[in-house]
Image (tube, helix red, strand yellow):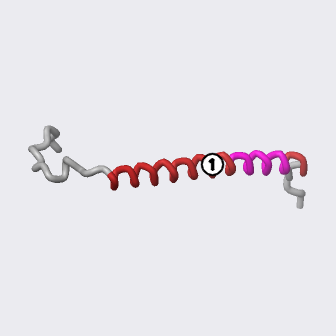
């Protein structure tokens, strides 16, 4: 039985470093998006909604 072709430890370390950097960037993006969504939610709760008290007209889009 032949031994499977395994990557070198240096290659694995390089790949793991890349994955770690990717997850750090993704985490920062998610944190920023959460903050922006929270700020948007807070600002929409503070402003009175004018559209909720008005009756809605007929939609211009027709679903087929």
Q: Main secondary structure of the magenta part?
A: helix
| Quarter of the C terminus within the rendering | top left
Residue, far top? 60
Left or right: 34 as drawn, with respect to 55: right
Query: How dense is the environment of label 1, judged by Cα within 10 Å: few (below 14), some, or many (20 and up)?
Result: few
Residue 64 in sight: no
- Name the residue: 69% across, 50% down: 24
- Name the residue: 56% across, 51% down: 30
- Among the 4 quarters of the image, the one containing residue 3: bottom right
Numbered range of the magenta stretch: 12-22
Residue 62 in sight: yes
Residue 33 coordinates in the image, percent (x, y): 52, 48
- Front residue (pair 21, 46): 46
Please check the rendered image and state whether residue 61 is part of the magenta-colored stretch, yes or no: no
Left or right: 43 as drawn, with respect to 57: right
Left or right: 64 as drawn, with respect to 46: left
Height in image: 46 above or below 64? Answer: below
Residue 47 coordinates in the image, percent (x, y): 30, 50
- Front residue (pair 42, 23): 42
Please check the rendered image and state whether residue 18 is part of the magenta-colored stretch, yes or no: yes
Residue 53 coordinates in the image, percent (x, y): 15, 52
| Residue position marked by numbered label 1 in the rendering | 28
Residue, far bottom? 1
- Name the residue: 79% across, 51% down: 16
């Amino acid at each position: 039985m032949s031994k499977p072709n395994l990557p070198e430890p240096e290659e694995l370390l390089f790949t793991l470093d890349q994955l770690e950097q990717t997850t750090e960037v993704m985490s920062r993006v998610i944190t920023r998006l959460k903050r922006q969504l929270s700020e948007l939610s807070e600002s929409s709760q503070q402003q009175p909604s004018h559209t909720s008290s008005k009756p809605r007209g007929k939609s211009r889009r027709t679903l087929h």
